[in-house]
Amino acid sequence: MSQSGQSVFVTGGTGYLGRSLVLRLLERGHTVRVLVRAGSEGKLPPGCEAVTGDPLDADSFKRHVRRADTFVQLVGVAHPSPAKAAEFRRIDLVAGKAGIRAAADAGARHLVYLSVAQPAPMMKAYLAVRAECEAEIRAIGLPATILRPWYVLGPGHRWPYLFLPFYRLMEVLPATREGALRLGLVTLEQMTAALVEAVEGPIEGVRTMGVSEIRAASERLQVQPN
């Protein structure tokens, strides 16, 4: 069931997933504050509050995080590829740990962390960084929802549509079904719905949402009242 009027702090709110999430949260009546670098405030939609800071430096923004907040960590390198291994450690890892530290220091009630499907046969550096951040969340003991998509289809991210027939075949064959579902494609709408569901359903402990759970979230959100 939807919980309106929640306080949500988002990092990466001007990115591919972040823009979609912030708009949906505002539509559903939540109070949204978004971490932005100085000069990027104009990228935010009306209705949310800009918090100026550096996502790689927890000390620059953690005083703005409240105990009542759900903290959503979305910062990451755009268009991940194996060639960006150094960037993953310089940006994704540092930003991830900064967000986790800020949420923990503030005593935020719930952390939503965007990870990646695991295990996977490629993108080893990307997976390693996300796994390291997941381990940090568990070590600190933050209540958290960890989302593990593989690839999110949407504007500017459509080329994998060519592989949809292959995925459908792999998902019905017993020998390949488990891997195909774990590394399946999700849409931007499905991913946004899953993030909203995570925000509106804070938990104790740590839960993970894989591709199947992410896909199902959009159906659940449609039947729930705002």
Image (cartoon, helix red, strand yellow):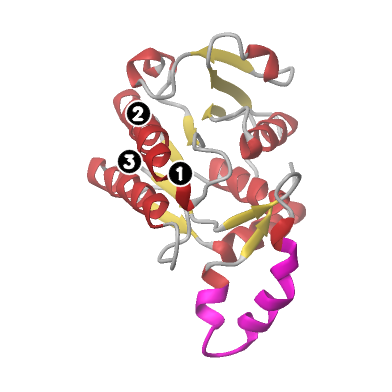
Disc 3 crowd, CA 10 A, few/some/many (<14, 14-19, 20+): many
Which residue is most to the top? 39
Disc 1 crowd, CA 10 A, few/some/many (<14, 14-19, 20+): some
Instruction: Look at label 2 and name its amino acid.
Output: Ala
CB under 8 Å between discs 3 and 1: no
Instruction: Look at label 3 and name its amino acid.
Output: Leu
Q: Which quadrant of the figure has residue 119?
A: bottom left
* Camera-nearest label, 3 or 1: 1
Asked if residue 195 can be seen in this view, the reply is: yes
Indicate the position of residue 51 as horizontal and vertical percent values: 53, 14
For the magenta stretch, what is the residue range? 161-180
Q: Is residue 167 magenta?
A: yes
Give the mark count: 3
Residue tagged 2: 98
* Secondary structure of the residue carrying numbered label 2: helix
Image check: 75 left or right of 144? right
Q: Residue at x 68, y 83 (%)?
A: 169
* Camera-nearest label, 2 or 1: 1
| Of callouts 3 and 1, the N-terminal one | 1
Image check: 210 left or right of 27? left
Image check: 160 left or right of 103? right
Instruction: Look at label 1 and name its amino acid.
Output: Lys
Residue tagged 1: 84
Asked if residue 115 can be seen in this view, the reply is: no
Q: Residue at x 53, y 15 (%)?
A: 37
6 over 161 or under it: above or below: above
Residue 142: image tag: 3
**Marks 3 and 1, how far apart at CA:** 29 Å
Helix, strand or loop: magenta stretch: helix
Disc 2 crowd, CA 10 A, few/some/many (<14, 14-19, 20+): many
